[in-house]
Amino acid sequence: MKVPQVISDAQRLADSFTDLHEAEAQPTIIVVSGLPGTGKSHFCRRLAECLPFFILESDALRKQLFPKPKYSAEESAGLFRAIYQLIEDLLKKGIPLILDATNLAKRHRERIYNIADRTGARLILVSVKAPPELVQKQLKKRLESKSANDNSDAGWAVYQKMRPTEEKINRKHFSVDTSRDITPIIDKVVREVKR
């Protein structure tokens, strides 16, 4: 994909945003990582209730760019090139963000770390986990009763395929197990943002 296409995809996504929050002198990006079905989107929505941050949800953005997604490697690469461009553009404008995406590979997270460094944004990392038996139940429920809030199409087979690709986060980060009360971690992240 050529650079003009990346910019045009990022611009198409940006043009669809209607509820961007007030710019900050030093914006924060909260990068939420985890396997499908672990509760990342729920965690991000709860976090956004406490912080005036804009959520970039990769599953929703994919469906904006690709109304009938194929989930191919090429499609995912194009999507994330647009997302990285979008993150950089929004942080340069001072817009605080929450990124809701699997972010399993270190090399993908490094792209975001570099953008945060270049834009002078504060970076907060959150790893979301849940016991596999809970994930399996949640993914089954997701497929049986598709909610309007749920943009993911990932099922148990996708979780099993992705699980071995998850690389440990070596930087300081918050860990949350969504089989437990997530409120204490949300409170910690909010305190870190407001420090």
Image: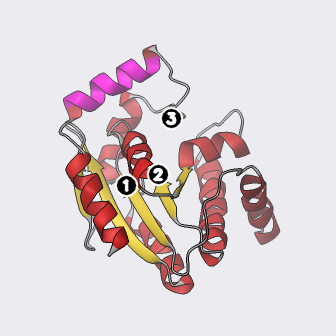
In the rendered structure, which disc, 2 or 3, sits on the residue that comes first in sequence?
2
Q: Are marks 1 and 2 in contact (CB under 8 Å)?
A: yes
* Residue pictured at 56% horizontal, 82% vertical: 119
Number of other residues with Cα within 10 Å of mark 1, as a class: few under 14, some 14 to 19, many 20 or more:
many
Compare marks 1 and 3 and give the one earlier in the sequence: 1
Seen from the viewer's position, the closer of residues 26 and 32 is: 26
- Is 140 magenta? The answer is yes
- Callout 2, which amino acid? Ala
Rendered location of residue 194, percent (x, y):
36, 71
Q: Residue at x 34, y 65 (%)?
A: 125
Percent x, y of residue 83: 61, 60
Let me know if residue 64 is in the magenta part: no
* Magenta-tinted stretch: 133-143
Query: Percent from the top left, x then y, of residue 184?
Result: 20, 51
Which residue corresponds to the image point at 50% horizontal and 20% vertical from the top-left? 146
Horizontal side of 96 relative to 136 (left or right) equals: right
Q: Which residue is mark 1?
A: 33
Mark 1 to mark 3: distance in Å?
14 Å
Taking depth in this image into account, of 53 and 177 the one nearest to the observer is 53
Q: Is residue 135 above or below residue 187?
A: above
* 54 shown above or below 145: below
Dot 1 or dot 2: first in sequence order is 1
Residue 168 in view, yes or no: no
Specify the quadrant that holds the C terminus.
bottom left
Asked if residue 177 lies left or right of residue 115, the reply is left
Query: Residue under circle 3?
Result: 152
